Amino acid sequence: MMALNQLIGIGLRHPHYKQVLEDLPSIGWFEVHSENFFANGGINAQLITQVSLNYPLSLHGVGLSLGSASGVSYEHLARLANLIERINPQFVSEHLSWGQVNGIFMPDLLPVPYTQESFQVLKQNILITQDFLKREIFIENPSSYIEYHASEQQEAQFLVELCKATGAKILLDVNNIFVSASNHGWDAKQYIDSIQKGLVKEIHIAGHSTKTLPNNQILRIDTHDSFVCSEVWDLYAYAIERFGSTPTLLEWDAEIPALSVLIDEASKCETYLSSYQKQARQAHA
């Protein structure tokens, strides 16, 4: 297997646990879903501890529900804080979404309306989360399939103002931008241009799928089950030009191929990172 630039990581998923621990492939870092490792004992706890001794880790949450008006769960936060203490991750991230109300949990990352009311809910929940964890978190832009008539701002503007108000940073998912922009008719490059350079601390790339609706409209779906398409690579190049050499993660969560395939796909980021670094050196020469 080839060696990855230390800025480039991949999502560590169950089919590759054993191979990663046995082979210790040359990968910059791994991301795991936080909730899969909340238990203090058992095989998963042993695994994540062993991996953390050999690689930088990022914890990516899917269940905190920062957009819920009923607030974040302190039990969830306590489990997350315990995991952070055990493995000392380089990044901790969550989504600009909601998934629970009054103790009822939805099996999805649901979009929030971009209103002042939602802003205040998210602001409070992010501040509570960061205060409890005693660290900065990253907020990921969502993929979406509907928009709310009640929204008062564009998504990028809402996310930027939220991060400025809380001190959180942005996990910029380039595939999510492409999916949402395609579904809603947004300008994907304009979305990136509207985000200040210092706010983006991590980038995600992934594959997605499409579905043709009865009206012949193409719906893009964030499935993480295929190779990154050329349009997303182009948008990634645009993001790197704007934000510079940024830690980048390849997500692949379904129809997961061999580890060597993931590493090969992630390695494509090197072309864009190296190009930016070369331009930066020339500019300062």
Image (spheres, rainbow, N blue to C red):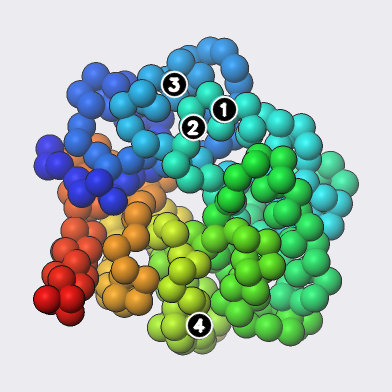
Which numbered disc, 4 or 2, marks the residue that appears first in the sequence?
2
Crowding near the residue tagged with mark 3, few <14, some 14–19, many ≥20 C-alpha atoms within 10 Å? some
Residue sitting at x 35%, y 76%: 242
User: What residue does disc 3 label?
Assistant: 49
> Could you tell me residue 198's position as x and y percent?
46, 69
- The reply to whether dot 2 and dot 3 touch (C-beta < 8 Å) is no
C-alpha span from label 1 to label 3: 11 Å
Labelled disc at residue 194: 4
Whether 131 is drawn above or below 284: the answer is: above
Q: CA distance from mark 4 to mark 2?
A: 32 Å
Q: Is residue 155 left or right of residue 103?
A: left
Q: Disc 2 residue type?
A: Asn
From this view, report whether residue 38 is shown above or below residue 221. Answer: above
The mark closer to the camera, 4 or 1, is 1
Q: Nearer the viewer, residue 254 or 74?
A: 74
Separation of disc 3 and disc 4 at Cα?
Answer: 39 Å
* Left or right for 83, reference 248: right
Q: Can residue 256 be seen in this snapshot?
A: no
Amino acid type indicated by mark 3 = Thr
Which residue is identified by label 1? Answer: 85
**Residue picked out by circle 2:** 88
Residue 241: x, y in percent? 29, 75
- The kind of residue on which mark 4 rests is Ser
Q: In the image, which is nearer the foreground, mark 2 or mark 3?
A: 2
Give, as a three-letter code, the residue at label 1. Glu
Q: Are the residues flagged by discs 4 and 1 in contact, CB closer than 8 Å?
A: no
Q: Position of residue 119 (x, y in %)?
A: 76, 69
Secondary structure under badge 2? loop
Q: Is residue 260 visible?
A: yes
Q: Earlier in the sequence, mark 4 or mark 1?
A: 1
